[in-house]
Image: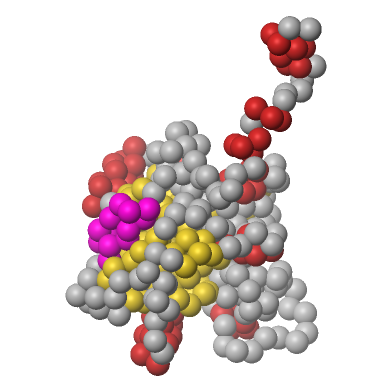
Amino acid sequence: MTTEDFNNSLAAADVSPLWNVMANLVTETPRPAARPHLWRYADMRPLLVAAGEAITAEQAERRVLILENPGIPGGHRTTDSLYAGLQLVLPGEVAPAHRHTQSAMRFVFESEGAWTAVDGDKVVMHPFDLVLTPNWRWHEHGGEGAPAIWLDGLDIPIISHFSAGFAEREGNAPAPDSVPPGISAARWGSNLKPIHPVGVKSDHPLFHYPFAQWRQALTAHAGASDPDTHCGHVMEFVNPVTGGAVMSTLSAFAHHLPAGMKTRPYRQSAGAVFTLVEGSATLTIDGTAYALEPRDVIAVPSWAALEIHAGSEPAVLFSYSDRTCHEKLGLWREQRD
Ligand code: GTQ
């Protein structure tokens, strides 16, 4: 058989030779398709305002601009495995209830009374609050007071990889205040938990991590210890039931760097999305420097070398990543230069 005949016969039989692609399939280190990329809030906000004129939240179901990684054109991904979007809800609007197997987190950029209800428990969102909608929990969003904008972090590419997407719209969603507002925080957010069943899903029971609380904890922690040389001070948002990651597929972190601190280059297998909360910070990713203003969003792909340089004020950042997936699958690695 000639080489050409051989190749044609393989293709006709729906097989291919591993030896031509081995080095690309089994790489020595991760080769993400995603590239480091910065989305400036100053550029994004006017586009969101225009989206607010183009379509209602009701018509859109969710009025979101997806942060598309330029290394994965049309992929609706921000890193290889993470989705990020910016969502706008105007006063008086409701983004209708639905539930899906994708897990979502919201990191609030602007809000003066907007709310999210999770299985009927309605929480009012304040800037830099973290709000979770774990998988298969009913959720809807409502606008109040002023336009609300938040960063949506979802595991859409992960769920799509496993072809495990299910969703329901409207249907039997509980009304937004069908349970006493804040009941979940009272039951699971006070270093207490009910010991008898309470008739609600309680595997991820806490879904509101207010800025006022986490900022205070981070400040106290940072004041009481030395920062890690490669990461600064980092605290993980945890599920109070397990002490582990906030959701089954997504991890979330608060970072604090003292004024002027520059971290050493740090790689980890988990890809991440970062945003700046306070101060100013320059993120250098694989040698390219990106200066961040508050609410700018940046993609840090798997195994990229990350250095963070705080400006003249302490820098506070928020990030989320697929680290908990890596850990559960025995894949997580880090490298400290
Ligand atoms: O708010 O429920 O950015 O379902 C993408 C999918 C937000 C949401 C997104 C969603 C939502």
Quadrant position of the C terminus in the picture: bottom left
| Residue 326 falls in image quadrant | bottom right
Q: Position of residue 255 (x, y in %)?
A: 40, 73
Please count the marks in the image. Answer: 0
Q: Is residue 82 visible?
A: yes
Dominant SS in magenta: strand
Asked whether residue 283 is drawn in magenta, I would say yes
Pick the front one: 81 or 303: 303
Pick the front one: 237 or 36: 36
Q: Is residue 124 visible?
A: no
Pick the front one: 289 or 224: 289
- Residue under the point 50% across and 53% down: 302
Quadrant position of the N terminus in the picture: top right
Query: Which span of residues is magenta-colored?
Result: 281-293
- Residue under the point 33% across and 76% down: 257
Q: Position of residue 36 (x, y in %)?
A: 39, 49
| Residue 266 falls in image quadrant | bottom left
Residue sitting farthest toward the bottom:
224
